[in-house]
Image (cartoon, rainbow, N blue to C red):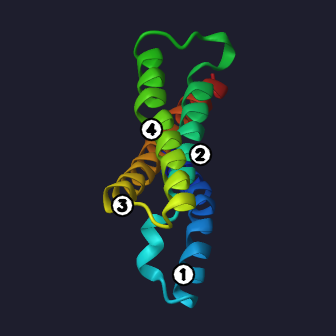
Amino acid sequence: MSKRIRIVAGLAAEVVFTILPLLVVLMVLLHAQRATHFFAAPEWSFGAAILFGQALVKFVSGLSREGSAATGPVALLVALLVVFGLVPSLFVLYMTLQVVVIHGEPGRWLQGFQVVLFVGAIAMYLILGTVGETWSKAREHR
């Protein structure tokens, strides 16, 4: 098994634990016969915010080990991840929780958007985590 596949497998194992609360929500909703409310659960946005933040940490820590500055393209990617990943995830989490408290269920667009953010967060975590871990391992072997 290649080093990259081992890294991706390790990162995927961490993603599984982010998915775990969603499975609990699904089980509760299935038991309550309200499975159609699954995508309305704010855990989607919560998970997306965590994964975007973790992707940022894995990526930057892997690229900046041994005092190397994360400049240029890395700094741009960090800014894009915060602006288009972490901040929207937290905003959608806020909106979802607000709507759930007041109205009971968020609209379909909000449900869909938080699931899209969650899937995007998984992709970014796996991609940037792999880059960061690979870079870190390569520097350790120098």
Of 64 and 54, nearer the camera is 54
Look at label 2 and name its amino acid: Ile
The local crowd at label 1, few if under 14, some if 14 to 19, many if 20 or more residues have their Cα within 10 Å, is some
Which label belongs to residue 29? Answer: 1
Q: Residue at x 34, y 58 (%)?
A: 112
Q: Residue at x 48, y 83 (%)?
A: 34
Residue 8 on image: x %, y % = 51, 50
- Badge 4 vs badge 2, beta-carbon distance below 8 Å: no
Q: CA distance from mark 2 to mark 1?
A: 23 Å
Q: In the rendered structure, which disc, 1 or 3, sits on the residue that comes first in sequence?
A: 1
Residue 86 on image: x %, y % = 50, 36
Look at label 3 and name its amino acid: Gly
Q: Secondary structure at mark 4?
A: helix
Q: Residue at x 40, y 32 (%)?
A: 84
Residue carrying label 2: 50
The local crowd at label 3, few if under 14, some if 14 to 19, many if 20 or more residues have their Cα within 10 Å, is some
Q: In the rendered structure, which disc, 4 or 1, sits on the residue that comes first in sequence?
A: 1
